[in-house]
Amino acid sequence: MSDSRDSAYYRAWMSSRTVSRRGLFRGLLAPGQRALQHGFESEALQRRVARPPQAAVEPLFLQSCDGCGACRDACPMGIIALDGGKAQVNIEFAECDFCGACTAICHSGALDFSAVMDTGLRPVISDQCLGRLDDLCRMCEIVCPRTAIFFNQQNQPIIDNTHCNGCGKCKLVCYHGDITLCLVSL
């Protein structure tokens, strides 16, 4: 059954003295339905690159970050870079020690002390990991400050993403290069 009533009908209906519950909710929820019909995707709001720790949610970060570079200059580890006028984290040669220097210097509100300290990166351990073969190499498990990586009885690495904060220490300590960091949605 097709309903020929549109938003103009409900606007007129709501402007009268009596408003039905159905008319009220249709009038209030119509913009959300239009957004869904026009292909609004929540994936567009997900992070595509790793952000500094304590970064605001992605839409707010993209709106707030003005690309001033103060966080990059304040980072003692040198892992923050500007790409496209927005700050991002690159953990290749140093880990994030979560000192908070980048958040303290951010004046735009893109980095916020109330946000969780997390870069959004998570380790992925390859099948060639020596820890899988025997228990001689467990450096990633040893160095993890949050005990997010451990090996089970079958020598398989387990990563607890709820404990991991994406510091990158596991990647840097793996001298065989069997750990890569991948972005996850927060």
Image (spheres, helix red, strand yellow):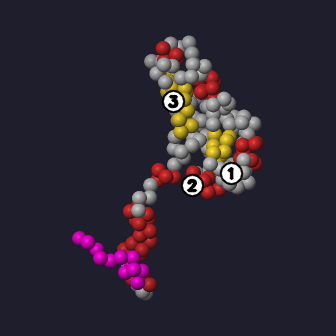
Q: Picture quarter containing residue 150?
A: top right
Report the residue marked by disc 2.
59
Give the residue pinned by disc 3: 124
Residue found at x 41% / y 66% = 34
Q: Quadrant of residue 174?
A: top right
Estimate the x, y position of residue 176 in percent, counting from the top left: 57, 19
- Tell me the kind of residue under disc 2: Pro
Q: Position of residue 181 (x, y in %)?
A: 55, 32
Task: Indicate which label's residue lies in the foreground, 1 or 3.
Answer: 1
Instruction: Name the image quarter holding residue 78.
Output: top right
Name the residue: 56% across, 12% down.
136
For the residue marked with disc 3, what is the amino acid?
Val
- Which disc, if any, is residue 33? none
Identify the secondary structure beneath mark 1.
loop
Mark 1 surroundings within 10 Å by alpha-carbon count, few (fewer than 14), some (14 through 19), many (20 or more): some
Q: Is residue 169 visible?
A: yes
Say what secondary structure mark 2 lies in: helix
Marked residue nearer the N-terminal end (1 or 2): 2
Q: State the residue position of label 1.
A: 67
Viewer-proximal residue among 136 and 93? 93
Name the residue located 51 percent from the left edge and 29 percent from the top edge.
124
Specify start and end residues of the magenta stretch as a single range: 1-12
Q: Quadrant of the C terminus?
A: top right
40 left or right, relative to 48: left
Q: Is residue 7 magenta?
A: yes
Is 54 situated above or below 124?
below
| Residues under numbered marks 2 and 3 in contact, where contact means CB atoms less than 8 Å apart | no
Q: Is residue 54 in view?
A: no
Q: Position of residue 85 (x, y in %)?
A: 65, 50
Would residue 75 be found to the left or right of residue 1 on screen? right
Q: Is residue 47 magenta?
A: no
